[in-house]
Image (cartoon, grey):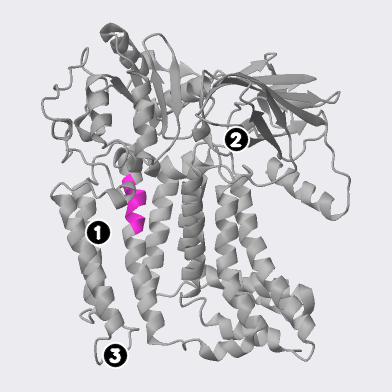
Amino acid sequence: MRRLIFVLTFFLALGAGAQVIEPIKWNFSSSNDGQNAELVFMAVMEKGWHLYDTYLPEGGPIATSFVFEDTTLFTREGALLAFPEPVETFDPTFQMNLRYFSDTAVFRQKVVLGEGVTQIKGYVEFMGCDDEQCLPPAEVPFIFTFSQAGTAAAAAEGAGVPLAADGGSGNSLWVFILISLLAGLAAILTPCVFPMIPMTVSFFMRGSENRGKAIRSALFFGLSIVAIFTLLGALFSFGIFGPNVGSLLSTHWIPNLLFFILFFIFALSFFGLFEIVLPSSLVNKTDAKADQGGIVGAFFMALTTVIVSFSCTGPFIGALIIEAVQGGGMRPLLGMFFFGLAFATPFTLLAIFPSALSKLPKSGGWMNVVKVVFAFILLAFGLKFLSNIDQVYGFGLLSRDLYLAIWIVLFFLLGLYFLGKIKFSHDSDLPYLGVGRLFLAIAAFTFVVYLFTGLLGSPLKPISALLPPATVTAAPVATMTSPGATVPQPLCGPAKYADKLHLPHGLNGYFDYEQGLACAKEQGKPLFLVFKGHACANCKKMENSVWTDSEVLRMLSEKYVVVALYTDDRTTLPESEWKSDAEGKTLRTMGKVNLDLQIRKYNTNSIPFHVVIEPDGTEHQLAVTFDADEFRDFIRKGVE
C-alpha cells in the first residue's frame, strides 16, 4: 500500500507541474580487453538519501536491479559485486530490516562479450529514500560501447521502455506483444462487447454537427481505454504487488486454484448456465458521468465500456497478466497496453467513421457460437492451473496422460458442436452446415488426432509448454545419440529427491547442488546447472526444443554432471538442510533454498537459467533461448 501511495503521489505531482526530485545520479563506465569486459555502475547520492540493495525481502521497497535489453550478447563471469558493503538497519517506513547504500555505491559485473558485440544496452531500476520520504521507482537507461582497441565508454540516455527484459529474448517479447494484440481483438467478438459498438458510436454521434469536436472526443475515448488497461499492467510492472508476485501467481496453490475456479465459472456462464452481471450501481454511476459529454464524458464512457465488458474480457486479462508477470520486467505494462490498443481501436475508428457501422455483421446466432467456443477453450486452459498445483506440490494426481485425455474429450466435443451435433439452449437452429463451420470442425478433429499422438509418446513440441511433463520419455538418450555412442555413465550415488523429480529425455542427474558439485569433482567433469520450475512454460519449451538436439543430449549424458534445481518446489527439507537468507530468515522448502542460491550466486531469479561450471571453476551463463545453435554452442563451452 505504501508503494502504491508513492506512485500515485508521483503522478499527481507531475500533473500539478511539480519539480521532479533527482537525489541519486548514475554514472556508467567500462573497460574491455578483447572479449573480456567489466561493466561499472556508480550511484552518487545527495546527503541524507540512500539507495536500496539489489536483494530485499518481500513486502519492502524496490530493490536496485540492472536490466539488459539482450542477454544473448554476453555471458556473465561471476556474480555482481557491490562496493562498499551495504549497511543494514531497521527501516521505520517499511517496518523491517533493510540494506542500503549511502553517499556512493559502485556495482561491477564481469562479462564475456559475444563475437562482434560492440554495444550493450539496458537500464537500472532503483528506488531512493531519505528519513522523511521515498521516491517512486525510477529507471535510468545505459549504453556500453566497446571498441576493437579494447576501450569502452558508457552513457545514460533519456528515459525509454526497453524492448526486452533480462532473462528473455527480443523474439519472445514480440510474440508476447502479438498475442496481446490478438487477445484484444478477440475480446471484441465476445457477446458482452460486440453489441456495445452501436451504442458507443451513437454516443459520439450526438453533437456531430461539430465534426472536429466529435473526432477529438472519440480519440480521447480510445486513449482512455488504453490508459485504463495500461494502468492495470503498470501496477504489476512497477512492483506494486510485491517483487515475487510472478512466482506467487504461478506456483502457490491459492492463486492457481482461484484462477481455475474463475475460468470454470466463466466457462459455465458462456455455456449459458447463468449470466455474469457486475453490480448495476457501479455501471450506473459511470454511465451517468458519461452523459456529461465532452472530454469528461468520453473518459467515463471508456470506463463504462471497460467495466461492462469485464464479464467477457476477464479471462483474457487474467491469462495475459499471469503470462506477463512470469516474464517480468515491463511485460505486464506492455501486454496490457497492446491489449487495450487492439480493444479500443475498432470502437474509436467506428466513432470517427460511423458510416462503416452498417458494414458490420449484426449480433445474432454467431455470437452464441463464439461464446460456446470460448467456453471450451476456457475449460482447456483452466486445467493448466490445476496442473501447476499438482506439479509444484508433488501430488501426482493430474498426469500428462489424464491431462491429454481431458483435452481430447473437450476438443472432440467442440468439433461435434461445430457440426451441429451438440446444441445449447441459447443456440439458434442450424438448418444446414456452412462451409466455415465445416472447416472449423475439421480443425478441431485434426487437433484431437494430434493430441492422441501424445498418448502414444509424441512430445507435442508446439504445445509442450502448456502440458505436464512426461514421466516416461518417448525419446530416451539412447535413441537420440549417434550409432556407437556410449551409454550415459552412472551417477556417483543415488540422487536425492529422485523419487519425485526427473530429468527430461532419459538423462541422469541430481536435484541437489552440493551433491551434484561433489560428483562433478569426483568424476572430473564439468557441471551443467539449470534453475527451473514446475510451472515454468519456457523451461518446458526449451527442454522440448533445444535440449532435444542429438549433440546436446550426447554431451549432457556423457560429458556432464547434470543438476536441475527447482525454484518453485514446495517440498519441506529435513531440518539439517534448512538455510538462512541474507535477512536471517529460515528457508525450509526446496524451492526457497534453490531460489536463494540462484539470487546470491547469480543475482537473478529468472528461469530457466543455465550455468556451465568447468572443472577449474570457470563459469558460463545463459538465460532463456530457443535457438538450437546458440544452446549447442553454450553446451560445448564446458567440454572444449
| Residue designated by label 1 | 407
Q: Gap between marks 3 and 1, in whole Å?
A: 27 Å
| Residue designated by label 2 | 67
Tell whether 141 sits left or right of 515: right
Q: Is residue 367 above or below residue 635?
A: below
Residue at left offset 60%, top offset 46%: 237
Q: Is residue 118 above or below residue 7?
A: above
Q: Is residue 631 above or below residue 42?
A: below
In this view, the residue in front, 447 or 227, is 447
Residue at left offset 26%, top offset 37%: 548
Q: Looking at the image, tell me whether mark 3 or mark 1 is earlier in sequence order.
A: 1
Amino acid carrying label 1: it is Trp
- Number of other residues with Cα within 10 Å of mark 2, as a class: few under 14, some 14 to 19, many 20 or more: many
In this view, the residue in front, 629 or 541, is 629
In the picture, which quadrant includes the C terminus? Answer: top left
Q: Gap between marks 2 and 3, in whole Å?
A: 56 Å
Amino acid carrying label 2: it is Val
Q: Looking at the image, tell me whether mark 1 or mark 2 is earlier in sequence order.
A: 2
| Residue designated by label 3 | 429
Please name which of the two marks, 1 or 2, marks the residue nearer to the observer: 2
